[in-house]
Image (tube, rainbow, N blue to C red):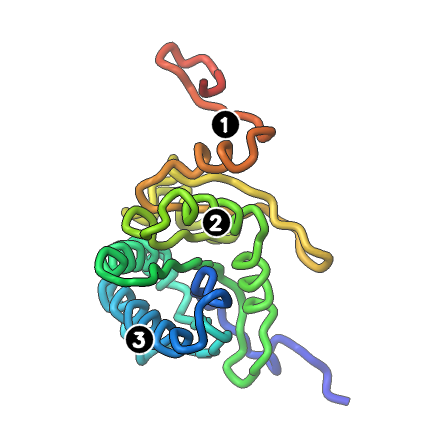
Amino acid sequence: MQVLTSGHYNANTHAVLAVDIVGSSKASDDLLDPMKTEMETLVSRSFTAVGLAPGEARHFRETGDGLMVAYPDQAVGQLCEVVFHLDHLLRSRNRYARVPMRARVAVHMGPMADNHRYHRTYITLTRLLCASTFNDAVGYWCRLDPTGDKFGAGMIVSQSVWRNVVEPFGVALIPPARCGRISVTTPDFADSAWIHLPGLDADAVLAEVNPAMPAPLVFDRVSRLSTTA
């Protein structure tokens, strides 16, 4: 029996991203393949916009109507910025399309071995992408914006990405104050995550989705801790 050691595993930290088309299962059969092809094109353009070569992605995996990719860990900030460009491209596209298209994006970072096909990091990425609160927030704006020209894509990032990159203002296009914290809990995963909806206040959206949620704490002008109205 071979003992699994760090030397045998030979894993390196990767930044990973997943993209999924919102509501594609409700589309007619003749639209499914064109939607997937178009989304792949828009994602590729978004990668290029943030300075990542789509052809250099590692561990590429198709996930039905979506995909998962990995890059070296130093690309995590760029992967977070993908949602900004993808949101813009989708909203522009939806202004002239018969059927609107939106996307959910998840970003995480963790160890991956180049000679393995199955990775815990991708499992965590999937749990984030499927988080019910995140999906509720995305669905809420899809209903508010039926034509899709005001909301094109939303993103969820893991706690590791938040603490190491987003919260320290490491991503120019993702202001921490516009992100909202949620809890992600499944039978095999439990952690905090943060959502970002470009151009929107995530905490305000979460409060609309679930009025029972407590209002976020903020500092007012006299530096007292208070709740938003």
Task: Give me the residue at 27% from left, 54% from top.
Answer: 91
Q: Give the farthest residue toward the right.
A: 1
Label 1 to label 3: alpha-carbon separation: 38 Å
Image height of 27 relative to 183, above or below: below
Quick one: 16 or 143, which is closer to the camera? 143
Could you tell me residue 197's position as x and y percent? 38, 46
Q: Is residue 1 left or right of residue 154?
A: right
Q: Give the farthest residue toward the top.
A: 222
Label 3 to label 2: alpha-carbon separation: 28 Å
Label 1 to label 2: alpha-carbon separation: 21 Å
- Crowd class of label 2 (few under 14; some 14 to 19; many from 20; radius 10 Å): some
Say what amino acid the circle numbered 3 marks: Pro
Task: Give me the residue at 27% from left, 74% from top.
Answer: 53
Q: Nearer the viewer, mark 1 or mark 2?
A: 2
User: Which residue is tagged 1?
Assistant: 216
User: Which residue is tagged 2?
Assistant: 139
- Crowd class of label 3 (few under 14; some 14 to 19; many from 20; radius 10 Å): some
Say what amino acid the circle numbered 2 marks: Gly
| Mark sitting earlier along the chain (3/2) | 3
SS label for mark 1: loop
Could you tell me residue 57's position as x and y percent? 37, 76
User: Which residue is tagged 3?
Assistant: 54
Could you tell me residue 90's position as x and y percent? 29, 59
